[in-house]
Amino acid sequence: MSERAVPFYCPYCGEEDLHPFEGDGTWHCRACARKFRVNFLGIGAPQ
């Protein structure tokens, strides 16, 4: 299993110029200069 989720594109501008930033799951998009975090919440329907 991978240590972190890797996004394929920026959720804000759609570009693929992403680089890991400080902390787990945090990414920096060089195209729009935004930083965002990817979190895994779980699998399946809530009970």
Image (spheres, rainbow, N blue to C red):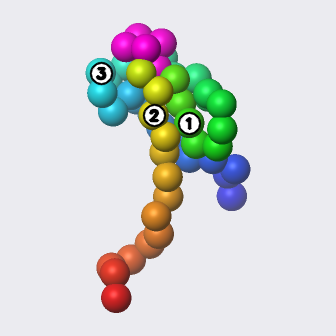
Circle 1 residues within 10 Å: few <14, some 14–19, many ≥20: some
- Observer-side mark, 3 or 1, equals 1
Say which residue label 1 marks. 26
Q: Is residue 34 above or below residue 43?
A: above
> Residue 13 vs residue 18: left or right?
left
* Figure disc tally: 3
What secondary structure predominates along the stretch shown in magenta?
A: loop
Q: Nearer the viewer, residue 39 or 7?
A: 39
Whether residue 16 can be seen here: no
Q: Secondary structure at mark 1?
A: strand
* x and y percentages locating residue 14 in the rendered image: 31, 24
Whether residue 46 can be seen here: yes
Residue at x 62%, y 27% (from the top left corner): 21
Q: Is residue 6 above or below residue 2?
A: above
> Residue 4 vs residue 31: left or right?
right
What distance separates the C-alpha of mark 3 from that of mark 2?
12 Å
Residue at x 53%, y 30% (from the top left corner): 27
Say which residue label 3 marks. 13
- C-beta proximity under 8 Å, tags 1 and 2: yes
Quadrant of the image containing the C terminus: bottom left
Quadrant of the rendered structure where residue 9 is? top left
Span colored in magenta: 29-33
User: In the drawing, what numbered circle is on residue 36?
Assistant: 2
Q: Secondary structure at mark 2?
A: strand
Quadrant of the rendered structure where residue 13 is? top left
Residue at x 46%, y 20% (from the top left corner): 29
Q: Secondary structure at mark 3?
A: loop
Of callouts 3 and 2, the N-terminal one? 3
